[in-house]
Image (tube, rainbow, N blue to C red):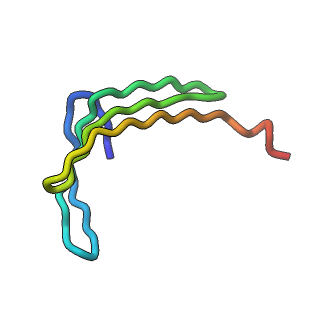
C-alpha cells in the first residue's frame, strides 16, 4: 500500500471467496525518521467493496544494534 496524502491507492485483494476491490485514501501522513529512531502516524480511509472504515496507526521504532550481544 502507498500512503500519500490526498491520493487513492487502488488494488485487488484475492481471497478464497473471490476478489475484492480495495481503495486506501490517506487523510494524514506524518513521519520523523533518523539514524537511531523514528515514528510514523497515519490516518486513512479503507474501502473494501461496500464496506468503509477510517483507521489510525501510530508506530514508533528505535535502533536496537546497541542492545544485541
Specify the farthest residue to the right.
69
Which residue does the image show at 19% across and 67% down from the upper left? 19
Up the image or down, 22 lies above or below 44; here it is: below
Specify the farthest residue to the left.
50
Measured as percent of width and height from the top left, residue 21 is found at: 17, 57
Residue 9 left/right relative to 58:
left
Up the image or down, 57 lies above or below 11; here it is: above
Please identify the quarter of the rendering in which residue 35 is found. top right
Measured as percent of width and height from the top left, residue 20 is found at: 19, 62
Please identify the quarter of the rendering in which residue 27 is found. top left
Residue 63 left/right relative to 68:
left
Residue 31 seen: yes
Which residue does the image show at 32% across and 37% down from the upper left? 3
Please identify the quarter of the rendering in which residue 37 is found. top right
Which residue does the image show at 38% across and 36% down from the upper left? 56
Query: Closer to the camera, 21 or 33?
Result: 21
Residue 32 left/right relative to 8:
right
Measured as percent of width and height from the top left, residue 10 is found at: 20, 48
Residue 10 seen: no
How many labels sit on residues? 0
Which residue does the image show at 56% across and 33% down from the upper left? 60
Residue 39 left/right relative to 42:
right
Query: Closer to the camera, 25 or 66?
Result: 25
Query: Closer to the camera, 44 or 3?
Result: 44
Amino acid at each position: 500500500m502507498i500512503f500519500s496524502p490526498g491520493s487513492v491507492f487502488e488494488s485487488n485483494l484475492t481471497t478464497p471467496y473471490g476478489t475484492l476491490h480495495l481503495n486506501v485514501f490517506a487523510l494524514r501522513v506524518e513521519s520523523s525518521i533518523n539514524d537511531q529512531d523514528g515514528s510514523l502516524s497515519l490516518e486513512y480511509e479503507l474501502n473494501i467493496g461496500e464496506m468503509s472504515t477510517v483507521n489510525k496507526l501510530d508506530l514508533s521504532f528505535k535502533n536496537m544494534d546497541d542492545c544485541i550481544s
